[in-house]
Amino acid sequence: MRAILLLPLFLPGLAFGDFQADFKKVHESDDHAAMVKLLAGAEKTEQENPDYYALASNYWWQFASEINISTKPADKGEPSIRELDGDKEVGSISTNGDVDPSLRKKALSLTAEGFRRFPQRLDIGFGLAQVQFKTGDAKASVATLRQILKISSAPDAKLKWTANADLPEPAATFVPVSIQGYTAPLFRQETPEADTLCKELLDATIAAFPNHPYAYNMLAALADAKGDKDESYRLLKVAAEKAPEDTLILINLAEAHQARGKKADAAAVYRKLIALKPDDETEAAAKEALDALENDKAE
């Protein structure tokens, strides 16, 4: 099984304003009927409010994910409910979205419309990519992410986040890190189709943000998985040049040096890693690897 760091995916967060304040109040009351009424009215009055699309799509996605206990028979893979004094199935445990697939479609439609209207709102864009990914349309998700890369790397990009605030970090850092939350699960699927999409997204990330190291590191892992050790090694060295103090990349580079018999190079990387004072586990692993190299040299 391929091992790679996986960042969590995310949906748009909550924001506050006039509509946002009403949404917050109803949301905290946990009154689904009131929320349905609020969102139905806002569908016409809040078309020019990007947070309407962020909040409404998020609500429907979360509601679709809530547990639903019903009398319908269990589908394949679902837990069933049975009588205490027998083995008769009397119901099933699923989610609201499994019972009513239109809920996820509603979340998808709202997020897509929100991103179409407000492409500078990257929280909505990433939300759309996640909904697409989680509903099994990885190809559409990658297309959305490539659009985000194009928008966010433009010289005059005026990018926004939840409540039209600025991005939490500069786009050159924030966007590539967020993209890894999608390339990593594609990599882990270990299928030709997923690998093709993964590489497509990694190449697009490098084209948009060539100085960020993560895509090079992931491309190296993909090349290694396909047996192209030389290309993997080259990409790891590029990644290390882009981020000379990234401990994960340094570990990968040291192991690549060692695999090629370049013990002195590997030892130098391990010493650099230890000097950076990483977390205890990483430091212990680097010291153990360095000791093994030095003992091997002594023999």
Image (tube, rainbow, N blue to C red):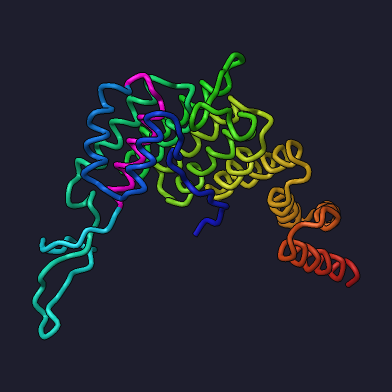
Along the line of sight, which residue is nearer the eye, 20 or 118? 20
Viewer-proximal residue, 223 or 131?
131
Left or right of 214: which side holds 35? left
Vertical position of residue 293 compared to residue 247: above or below: below
Residue beneath the point at 39% across and 41% down? 24
Residue at image location 23% in from the left, 49% down from the top: 97
Vertical comparison of 34 with 84: above or below: above
The one nearer the camera, 37 or 229, is 37
Q: Residue furthest right?
A: 298
The secondary structure making up most of the magenta span is: helix
Quarter the C terminus occupies: bottom right
Taking the spot 63% from the left edge, 38% from the top edge, the residue there is 216
Q: Which residues are magenta?
A: 47-65
Q: Is residue 42 visible?
A: yes
- Residue 48: say if magenta: yes
Residue drawn at x 8%, y 77% as measured from the top left:
88
Judge left or right: residue 197 versus residue 265: left
Q: Position of residue 266 (x, y in %)?
A: 80, 55
